[in-house]
Amino acid sequence: MKNTFFSILLASCCIVSSCNAYGNELDDANVAYNSDDPTNFNFAKAFGLFQKLANEGNVKAQYQLGVFYSDGCVGIDKTICVQDYGLAAKWFKAAADQGDAQSQEELGGLYRLGLGVRKSCEEAIRLTTLAARQGLARANYELGFFYGQGVCFNKNPQLAYMWFNIAELNGDSVASSARKGISEQLSRSQIEEALELSTKCIRSQYSKCE
């Protein structure tokens, strides 16, 4: 019994120690990348740490590498990182598969545009919906855009209004103007129905949104 207890205690200590080291390296990477102090900013160090952590399965690091490769390290250091949508898709997928909403939304965008992956409306909808159902405002907005413009869906102004409204409630800064714009295509009763759908969607934790 004692041996079992000490084995569990030792394993727990190892897990905590590992998590602390993990967190410390992520903190170091963030400081090296985000610091406004030129003496602390070191992109080569940050990129190396993010890459190491991403290979070890760290979701935040995987997402950050996806962003680096998607943007091509614009304004940072193109000798270390160049735009590569294939690598961006790889890292976004690694994080998306672990449930990261931001990565799901980003990867959905790559599938919609066919950047680094084969163009697929099915995957774009699936991934964007997964992110939207986690309450990610940008993904809520994207679904509103899809329905409003008839991108990957048949046009449906009422559902577009619903998703723009949810995006606004979740803090998206441009959703309000998009919602007002799409409202011109709806009657008062349709708007009221869309608002009811918004409430139902949020209260059901995004399981009843149609």
Image (tube, rainbow, N blue to C red):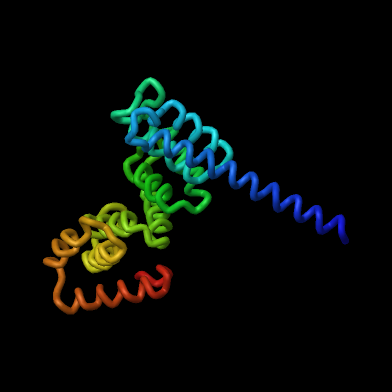
Q: Quadrant of residue 192?
A: bottom left
Question: Percent position (x, y) of residue 127?
Answer: 42, 52
Which of 105/110 is in front?
105
Say which residue appears at 23% left-offset and 68% top-offset.
158
Which of 57/107 is in front?
57
In the rendered view, tell whether residue 17 sits above or below residue 48. Answer: below
Which of 112/201 is in front?
201
- Left or right of 97: which side holds 115? left
Question: The N terminus is located in which quarter?
Answer: bottom right
Question: Percent position (x, y) of residue 15?
Answer: 67, 49
Residue that protrudes farthest toward the top in the picture: 79
Question: Percent position (x, y) of residue 19?
Answer: 60, 47
Question: Percent position (x, y) of residue 31?
Answer: 42, 37
Say which residue appears at 25% left-offset and 74% top-offset.
195
Q: Quadrant of residue 79?
A: top left
- Left or right of 181: which side holds 68? right
Say which residue appears at 28% left-offset and 77% top-offset.
196
In the rendered view, tell whether residue 168 sits above or below residue 9. Answer: below
